[in-house]
Image (cartoon, helix red, strand yellow):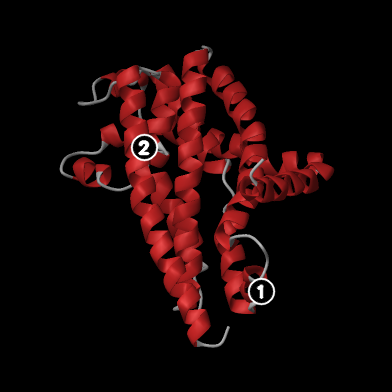
Amino acid sequence: MNKFPQKYLAIFQTELRQMTTYAWDFVLGNITVVLFFYVLLQVWQATITPEELAKIEGNSLSWDQLIWFLAAGQILYFSVQTEAQLEIEHDVISGNIVTTLARPYDYLLARFASVMAHTLLSFAVAFPCGIIVAWAASGTFAISIWGILAFSAAFAFRSVLFFLLQATAGLATFWIEKATAFVWVLGLLILVFGGGAVPIEFWPEPYRSIIELTPFPAMMYYPAKLLIDPSLSLFFSAILRAVAWLVILGGIVAAIYHRALRRLDINGG
């Protein structure tokens, strides 16, 4: 077997073993999805009634579907490792990245393997929690096996997109002193403009069209919608959007990473 993927698979497995050593601590630290979903649901219930929801122009969601959509959004939001950007920033500021670059693997791919281990375990906790809470809150089981499979596929793309955005912000530390604030900004942008708190079909024009031009709907709205409406047209639309942004963001990260390495060489790193 090719040694190239084996290196990163080993990093993935090592990180996974380290986290499962303290499995209950990890579970308790990741069930905040329940609390945030409950708060979000209370806000919606205080803001609008099911009858008023049905009258909103452009809305295709019933009240039960909205509950499941919001649950899917919280699962997506809490199943990613927000610390990845901070870890890249720390490596750059502390100089650890120089030591890591001397090792026989690519720095960003190794970081990606580590992040995916955390993401997989977080998803394994957040997904059943979100499903149970949505089921209890709506009184219906509004999803199917096809919805779960489509949602899982879109979630995989969403995870890669999120890492690329984090890598972009983390590598920016080569030029700016601190990139910590981008962690909160990035999370807020995904939650608001990705449709995690308010479905983007509720946004009036021209704001919705502008939001559609960003990568955030591909990271939140479309994966969440697939859970409750796993149509082929929606699935292909979601995947095509994700792939397009993977190419764009991947190119940006590659360019920034290349320039960062050149900056290290120039400075004698």
Give the image quarter of residue 205: top left
User: Which residue appears at 36% of the width and 40% of the height?
Assistant: 243
User: Which residue appears at 62% of the width and 69% of the height?
Assistant: 101
User: Which residue appears at 56% of the width and 69% of the height?
Assistant: 89
Q: How many marks?
A: 2
In the rendered image, the residue lying farthest to the right is: 21
Residue placed under numbered mark 2 in the picture: 198
CA separation in Å, label 1 and label 2: 40 Å
**Depth-wise, is mark 1 or mark 2 nearer the camera?**
1
Give the image quarter of residue 198: top left
Picture coordinates of residue 252, whole percent (x, y): 37, 60
Picture coordinates of residue 245, whole percent (x, y): 35, 46
User: Which residue appears at 76% of the width and 48% of the height?
Assistant: 14
Give the side of residue 39 with respect to residue 1, left or right.
Answer: left
Placement of 223 over or under 183, stated as above or below: above
Q: Is residue 214 visible?
A: yes
**Element type where label 2 sits in the image:** loop
Q: Amino acid at mark 1?
A: Asn
Few, some or many residues within 10 Å of mark 2 (<14, 14–19, 20+): some
Picture coordinates of residue 132, whole percent (x, y): 61, 22
Residue placed under numbered mark 1 in the picture: 96
Foreground residue, 183 or 251? 251
